Amino acid sequence: MTKYWVNDALVDAEHATVSVLDHGLTVGDGVFETVLVRDGIAFAITRHLDRLQRSLAGLGFSGPDPTLIRHAVDTVVSDSGVSTEFSRLRITVTSGAGPFGSERGDVAPTLVVTMTASAPWPSTTSLATVPWTRNERSAIAGLKTTSYAENAIALASAKRRGASEAVLADTQGRLSECTGSNVFVVVAGEVFTPSLDTGCLAGVTRDLVLEWGSSVAPMHEGHLPYDVLRNADEVFITSSTRDVHPVVRIDDLEISAGPVTARLAEVFAAHARETTDP
């Protein structure tokens, strides 16, 4: 039987419940992390837990003791009853039950850790551009919060057009990010990704690609025009479950999965095999 972690214990999935007044449900007042579990190991878990703490600090409330969160993760990986060959583990922390409206209550935060078996992505993917923007001046810019309605709308639009991801500009028309992935472009053999001040998330895989990819090509963070997507030699996206994922179509534009992206994917995979908690 599948088990999930809720607050301070592992419970059967049918009993894994939270209050209907939980602010994660009523106003989206929470943070989360999605972690790849491959061959029984939660990859880059320390980086994910560190980012969870940064997101909590950005929202202005304290989560459970980090030691408890780490214990919950380890317990779910080992005892949830879910296959750990290739799975998504999600850590969610909310500000707990509260009054109606946005004001928080004076209660302990809610902690939920779940895991579900998944399947690797296809070898290539596609993107759709959308008319909505990432607000780089938002109070939650760069935080991985449970307020994901904007992303859900953009992703649904992309899916209707046959793409697996939507790619957004910021309010100044600069390339920012996808709904659940970071975006990179290759131009003249060099690799570029939007800087964090465009409102994009500091993705764990994004950071590792920037660190590990310097052996393949010059790596840059900066401001990029949105239409660089249509002019780049190669485009790829990264996330905790996609690793380095080549893009072969953007809207109606067909592009090639090029050699720089292929080499970055190889280097990333090699490093990930060598160290599971980089």
Image (cartoon, helix red, strand yellow):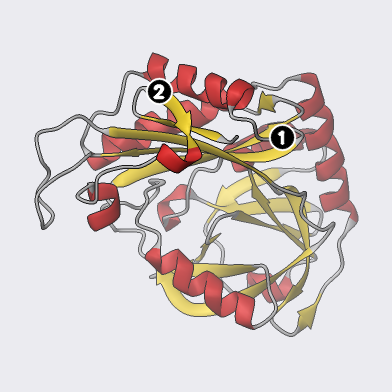
**What is the tally of numbered marks visible in this picture?**
2
Density class for disc 1 (Cα within 10 Å; few <14, some 14-19, many ≥20) is: some
Depth order, front residue of 182/151: 151
Density class for disc 2 (Cα within 10 Å; few <14, some 14-19, many ≥20) is: some
The amino acid type of the residue labelled 1 equals Ser
- Do callouts 1 and 2 mark residues in contact (Cβ within 8 Å)? no
Task: Please provide percent x and percent y for residue 67.
Answer: 40, 14
Depth order, front residue of 73/125: 73
Depth order, front residue of 47/119: 119
Q: Earlier in the sequence, mark 1 or mark 2?
A: 2
| Quadrant of res 87 | top right
Disc 1: which residue:
83
Disc 2: which residue:
9
Quadrant of the frame with the N terminus: top right
Task: Please provide percent x and percent y for residue 51.
Answer: 44, 33
Left or right position of 65 against 119: left
Left or right position of 3 against 199: right
Task: Please provide percent x and percent y for residue 159.
Answer: 62, 75
The amino acid type of the residue labelled 2 equals Ala
**Is disc 2 placed on a helix, strand or loop?**
strand
Quadrant of the frame with the C terminus: top right
Question: Residue at horizontal 41%, vertical 55%?
Answer: 199
Q: Is residue 255 visible?
A: yes
**Is disc 1 placed on a helix, strand or loop?**
loop
Question: Residue at horizontal 40%, vertical 35%?
Answer: 112
* Residue that protrudes farthest toward the right in the picture: 259
Question: Residue at horizontal 46%, vertical 73%?
Answer: 153
